[in-house]
Image (tube, rainbow, N blue to C red):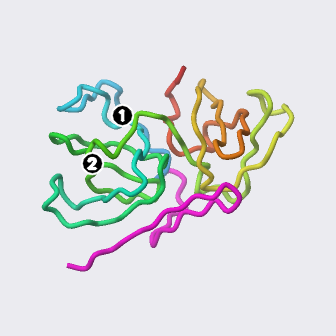
């Protein structure tokens, strides 16, 4: 079987995530859970839910066991992933490009991160306050990874870890948080 690899590196200035697949349909990036009442069979936590990649190097497999072939190799700690299913110590995850497979739970963290929407044509404004007229601190390119500190209905308070820049960004500009999700 052909082993496909993906090496993902995110540089804040370049905002590069290398992937052989791309999608311009914003709806595919903003999938929201139909009900917050769906629970994972192993953890009892909501499914789907967002997590982030903990490991410096992580293998996504085609099935939920080490015996399954490697589908992708990720090298991007902090990359947001969506858990869509649980099976024992394995989590079926999906990345922002819609690529899904299985990862061992030890590779994942509950630390919330997001990326600036890959579907955006322009840069997203990181603002001083959570309102449209607020001063723009910096503009972020699509695919820049951010740490999510909190979210309200329309805005998220985020930081760009490497440069210690923080501010507010419209929730609709991020992949890694659900539209109706509040994070405190």
Q: Is residue 180 magenta?
A: no
- Residue 78 relative to residue 15: left or right: left
Give the residue at mark 1: 34
Q: Residue at x 52, y 24 (%)?
A: 183
The quarter in which the N terminus is drawn is bottom left
Label 2 Cα neighbours within 10 Å, binned few <14 / some 14-19 / many ≥20: many
Q: Is residue 170 left or right of residue 182?
A: right
User: Residue 76 placed where, x, y %?
Assistant: 48, 55
Residue closest to the far bottom: 2
**SS for tag 2?**
strand
In this rendering, the answer to whether 16 lies above or below 124 is below
Place of residue 79 in the rendered image (x, y in percent of width and height, measured from the top left) = 48, 49
Q: Quadrant of residue 9?
A: bottom right
**Of the numbered discs in the image, which one, if any, rests on residue 92?**
2
Q: At which x and y percent is residue 128?
A: 80, 31
Magenta part, dominant SS: loop
Q: CA distance from mark 2 to mark 1?
A: 18 Å
Which stretch is magenta?
A: 1-27
For marks 2 and 1, the one nearer the N-term is: 1
Residue 155 seen by the camera: no
Give the residue at x 29% y 42%: 106
Give the residue displayed 37% in from the left and 52% down from the top: 94
In-image side of 1 versus 110 (left or right): left
């Amino acid at each position: 079987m052909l082993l496909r690899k993906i090496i993902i590196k995110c540089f804040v200035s370049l905002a590069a995530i290398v992937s052989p697949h791309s999608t311009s349909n914003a709806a595919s990036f903003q999938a929201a859970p139909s009900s917050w009442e769906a629970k994972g069979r192993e953890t009892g936590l909501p499914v789907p839910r967002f997590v982030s990649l903990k490991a410096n190097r992580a293998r996504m497999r085609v099935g939920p066991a080490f015996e399954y072939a490697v589908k992708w190799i990720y090298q991007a700690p902090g990359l947001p992933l969506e858990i869509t299913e649980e099976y024992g110590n394995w989590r079926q995850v999906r990345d922002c490009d819609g690529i899904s497979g299985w990862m061992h739970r030890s590779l994942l963290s509950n630390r919330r991160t997001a990326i600036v929407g890959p579907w955006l044509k322009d840069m997203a404004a990181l603002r001083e306050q959570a309102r449209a007229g607020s001063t723009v601190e910096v503009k972020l390119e699509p695919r820049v990874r951010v740490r999510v500190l909190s979210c309200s209905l329309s805005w998220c308070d985020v930081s760009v870890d490497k440069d210690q820049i923080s501010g507010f960004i419209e929730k609709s500009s991020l992949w890694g948080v659900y539209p109706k999700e509040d994070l405190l």
